[in-house]
């Protein structure tokens, strides 16, 4: 398991990993494995070695070999048709998602693909989305060959069932930017054309020029009013129709009144109007919204099982031939072949071969499960011991696992119903504003009725809750950016607010508080001599059982010994005679003939040599570093709970970390998890669920905030509100507390902007708000809001900074 | 003074031209990916010769 650090560390020329065995080298370049060496040879042969000059060791580790024929399903015309985006007589366009993409070298080599496969005409990378668009001549090459060429140089395209689902990829939405651009353009020009007005440059004798400018302004304000500001009207109207006063309604009202009054003034020739302020505020609000909605593009937050399932599967025909078909077309009764490391796409019965299925991602069980012929294997498990054949008993959409997605939590595209506090604040603010306007109206109707109209409209123009919207959007945008820096990628801005209200934290076990695919192993008993460890290693090496495999990797490799009478007793253990010694390994029942005492943690493997008990191995889940620390710090603030799909073998150990009072539930099915969260919410708890696998998908969806933990951001993560990198798991509490600062920041900048508003109101109630004053106040207050929110969110970030987390690029 | 009428009108038309160019650039998805082009522009067009690259690597190692 642990490789001793060599004195002179050699790293792989291709991928930068430490070279343990110095087998692979070309000239003086060392490689860690054959895969890396092969990739280098291909790149070298294709004259693409700049790959290694742009960045150091840019390659992707090739230790895991990819099965030949993996992309055979891409020969199927039906599948090709569904995958490609465009086709003419000779060319096809395909977009591949390449999660391995990480540096400039990647971009470089992926844009020079035609040197590796001359049928490729053009390839273009979108680094942000980790996608490459490839145009190729399908008479010279094929989709399969393109995919294989990518795989050959280490960029295996990720093709899943989701890629062929009916609703195609969301189109990049440009309206927000266009609206913003138009508003900005009109704002700038209106400001410029208003300069004579501000400085009274146009004397009264030059009426013509003044009118000309005013009409130009009006012309420029039209697109702002009708196009750029349209979303405020639409959303405000929608809110009112549902009898709900959201923040957009008063904003729309203010825009409408400003435009109306300006229109009246210009047409009647009585003034210049406030079109500059109107387009300015629309511009700033659109910037704020744009900034807030810029979330991390390469992470998809609404994946379901289809992004995890493969696209193609080999079906065995009656005459014994294999054919590749799309998983979606699988029928009950089909005989399928699953290769090593492939995912079983539908519930099926094992027909042939030896199945050891890893369900850690689907059910949370940490150890792979062995299945014998005739047993049912549920969809979603990953086969880990060679090829098997199965017969499908349920269609993909009807499987045990996929049924979770029929739950109501997934049905309604449930926008979590809670209304942001922004809207509540804006409502009070609006009432306050209306009363000021009313007071001004009453006062002037008594003293000088001619000023009523001017005063009321001016009040509404000056003090629309735009400042509140600006504070909120800029604060959120900034916080999202900072959270991204600490590798917490939130789906949208409202997640920050939900996060700040959390009082209960629910953990999943496997993959969340334990590290995926890692186990801790130790030996208790007599001190092992080298000969003894050789014997154990040889026996363990015979078995495919996951525990045996862990032991093999734990013990140092020795020479191969001669094994006789090897026997495997399913569910108990193995025995054999090696070098004349009789060795038994397995459960205590099997080795000692009696049940062992209560386990503290993990699984034990007992060993006896020549019927003499020598000790046992303990194989435990490897928990994340710093788990104890983070748990004890979370305890002070939150209710903690554990919800595991695994068995309770770790319960006692978990109690030593989480304490006795923490509620722990084991062997939870996906639905159970979902219902447990629902139950907590019915008791008015605000639940933060942290999980990683498909079995957590329901709970993540149901909870107030669902965070998916991901050790590798490229990995699949189920539908959730936020994705957190496993490396920054220990920052959880600080991140939640950081989100709690959101309200403070928004309020402080709002209070600041209200100060400006009071100055404006002072002029407004008197009925003589000059356009120049409005035009000065508006940008000043907007800019100071931006400065304050940026400053405050960076100030609160200092606390996070001190913890010195992992900030490396992925 | 009448010159100003024409000048302002002309300048505005010019500016609208740029606005249209901007809208076109957005609609043709040039704002979709704001990172890759910044890297792409730094790539050399010519392929680096094997020998030159060897020496490059050697100097890297001796550093």
Image (tube, coloured by chain):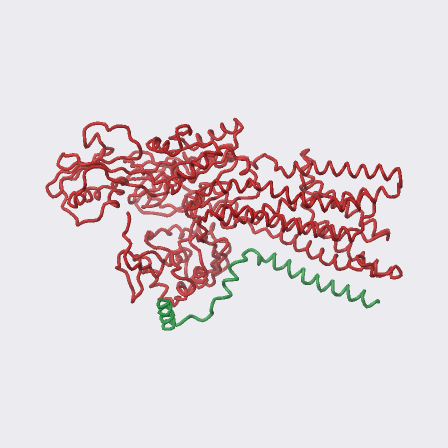
**Shade of chain A as shown in the rendered figure:** red
Q: From this view, report whether residue A175 is shown above or below residue A357.
A: below
Q: Position of residue A656 (x, y in %)?
A: 36, 32
Q: Is residue A113 visible?
A: no
Residue A459 position by quadrant: top right
Q: Does A694 sit left or right of A478 as displayed?
A: left
Residue A498 position by quadrant: top right
Q: Position of residue A395 (x, y in %)?
A: 41, 37
Q: Does A727 sit left or right of A450 as displayed?
A: left
Q: Does A121 sit left or right of A542 as displayed?
A: right
Which chain has been coloured green in this picture?
B
Q: Position of residue B2 (x, y in %)?
A: 84, 67
Q: Position of residue A566 (x, y in %)?
A: 16, 39
Can you name the residue that lies furthest to the left here? A580
For the image, the number of numbered tags is 0
Q: From this view, report whether residue A184 is shown above or below residue A469.
A: below
Q: Is residue A261 visible?
A: yes
Residue at 73%, 59% in the rendered image: A189
Query: Front-most of A450 and B47?
Result: A450
Query: Front-most of A139 and A173?
Result: A173
Query: Front-most of A446 and B3?
Result: A446
């Amino acid at each position: 398991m642990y490789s001793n650090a060599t004195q002179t560390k050699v790293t792989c020329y291709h991928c930068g990993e430490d070279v343990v065995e110095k087998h692979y080298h070309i000239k003086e370049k060392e490689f860690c494995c054959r895969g890396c060496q092969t990739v280098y040879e291909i790149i070298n042969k294709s004259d693409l070695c700049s790959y290694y000059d742009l960045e150091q060791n840019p390659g992707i580790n090739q230790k895991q070999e990819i099965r030949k024929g993996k992309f055979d399903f891409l020969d199927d015309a039906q599948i090709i048709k569904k995958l490609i985006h465009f086709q003419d007589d000779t060319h096809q366009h395909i977009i591949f998602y390449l999660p391995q993409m990480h540096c400039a070298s990647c971009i470089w080599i992926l844009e020079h693909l035609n040197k590796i496969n001359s049928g490729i005409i053009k390839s273009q990378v979108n680094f942000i989305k980790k996608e490459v668009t490839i145009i190729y001549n399908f008479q010279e090459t094929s989709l399969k060959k393109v995919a294989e060429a990518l795989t050959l140089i280490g960029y295996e395209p990720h093709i899943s069932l989701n890629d062929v689902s009916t609703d195609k990829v969301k189109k990049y939405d440009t309206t927000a930017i266009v609206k913003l651009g138009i508003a900005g353009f009109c704002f700038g020009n209106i400001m410029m054309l208003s300069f004579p007005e501000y400085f009274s440059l146009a004397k009264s004798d030059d009426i013509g020029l003044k009118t000309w400018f005013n009409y130009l302004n009006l012309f420029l304000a039209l697109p702002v009013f009708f196009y750029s500001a349209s979303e405020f009207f639409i959303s405000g109207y929608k809110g009112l129709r549902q009898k709900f006063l959201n923040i957009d309604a008063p904003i729309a009202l203010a825009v409408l009144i400003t435009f109306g009054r300006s229109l009246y003034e210009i047409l009647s020739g009585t003034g210049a109007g406030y079109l500059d302020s109107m387009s300015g505020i629309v511009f700033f609000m659109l910037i704020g919204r744009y900034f807030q909605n810029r979330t991390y593009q390469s992470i998809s937050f609404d994946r379901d099982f289809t992004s995890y399932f493969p696209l193609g599967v080999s079906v065995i025909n009656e005459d014994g031939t294999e054919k590749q078909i799309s998983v979606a077309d699988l029928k009950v009764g089909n005989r399928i072949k699953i290769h090593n490391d492939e995912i079983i796409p539908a519930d099926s019965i094992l027909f042939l071969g030896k199945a050891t299925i890893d369900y850690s991602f689907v059910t949370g069980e940490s150890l792979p499960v062995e299945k014998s012929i005739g047993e049912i294997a549920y969809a979603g498990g990953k086969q880990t011991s060679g090829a098997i054949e199965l017969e499908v008993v349920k269609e993909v959409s009807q499987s045990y696992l996929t049924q979770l997605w029929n739950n109501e939590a997934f049905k309604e595209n449930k926008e979590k119903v809670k209304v942001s506090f922004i809207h509540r604040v804006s409502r009070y603010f609006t009432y306050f504003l209306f009363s000021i306007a009313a007071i001004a109206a009453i006062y002037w109707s008594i003293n000088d009725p001619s000023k009523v109209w001017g005063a009321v409209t001016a009040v509404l123009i000056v003090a629309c809750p735009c400042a509140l919207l600006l504070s909120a959007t800029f604060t959120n945008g900034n916080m999202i950016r900072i959270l991204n820096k600490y590798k917490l990628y939130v789906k949208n801005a409202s997640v920050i607010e939900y996060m700040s209200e959390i009082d209960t934290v629910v953990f999943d076990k496997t993959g969340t508080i334990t590290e995926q695919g890692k186990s801790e192993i130790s030996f208790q008993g007599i001190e092992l001599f080298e000969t003894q460890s050789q014997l154990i290693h040889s026996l363990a090496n015979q078995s495919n059982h996951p525990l045996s495999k862990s032991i093999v990797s734990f013990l140092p490799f020795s020479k191969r010994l001669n094994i006789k009478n090897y026997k495997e007793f399913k569910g108990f253990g193995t025995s054999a005679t090696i070098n004349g010694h009789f060795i038994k390994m397995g459960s205590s029942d099997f080795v000692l003939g009696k049940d062992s005492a209560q386990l503290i943690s993990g699984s034990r493997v007992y060993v006896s040599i020549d019927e003499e008990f020598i000790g046992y191995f303990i194989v435990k889940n490897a928990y994340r570093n710093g788990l104890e620390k983070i748990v004890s710090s979370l305890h002070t603030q939150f209710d903690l709970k554990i919800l595991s799909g695994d068995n309770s073998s770790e319960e006692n150990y978990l109690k030593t970390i989480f304490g006795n009072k923490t509620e722990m539930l084991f062997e939870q099915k996906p639905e159970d998890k979902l219902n447990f969260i629902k139950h907590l919410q019915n008791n008015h708890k605000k639940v933060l669920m942290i999980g990683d696998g498909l079995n957590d998908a329901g709970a993540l969806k149901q909870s107030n905030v669902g965070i998916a933990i991901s050790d590798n951001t490229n990995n699949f993560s189920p539908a959730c509100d936020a994705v957190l990198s496993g490396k920054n798991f220990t920052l959880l509490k600080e991140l939640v507390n950081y989100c709690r600062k959101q309200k403070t920041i928004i309020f402080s900048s709002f209070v600041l902007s209200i100060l400006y508003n009071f100055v404006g109101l002072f002029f407004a109630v008197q009925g003589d708000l000059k356009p120049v004053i409005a035009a000065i106040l508006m940008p000043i207050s907007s800019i100071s809001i931006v400065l304050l929110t940026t400053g405050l969110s960076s100030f609160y970030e200092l606390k996070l900074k001190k913890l010195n987390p992992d900030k490396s690029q992925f | 003074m009448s010159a100003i009428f024409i000048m302002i009108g002309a300048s505005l038309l010019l500016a609208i031209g740029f606005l249209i160019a901007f809208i076109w650039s957005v609609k043709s998805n040039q704002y979709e990916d704001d990172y890759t082009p910044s890297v792409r522009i730094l790539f050399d067009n010519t392929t680096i010769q094997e020998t030159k690259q060897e020496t490059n690597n050697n100097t890297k190692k001796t550093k």
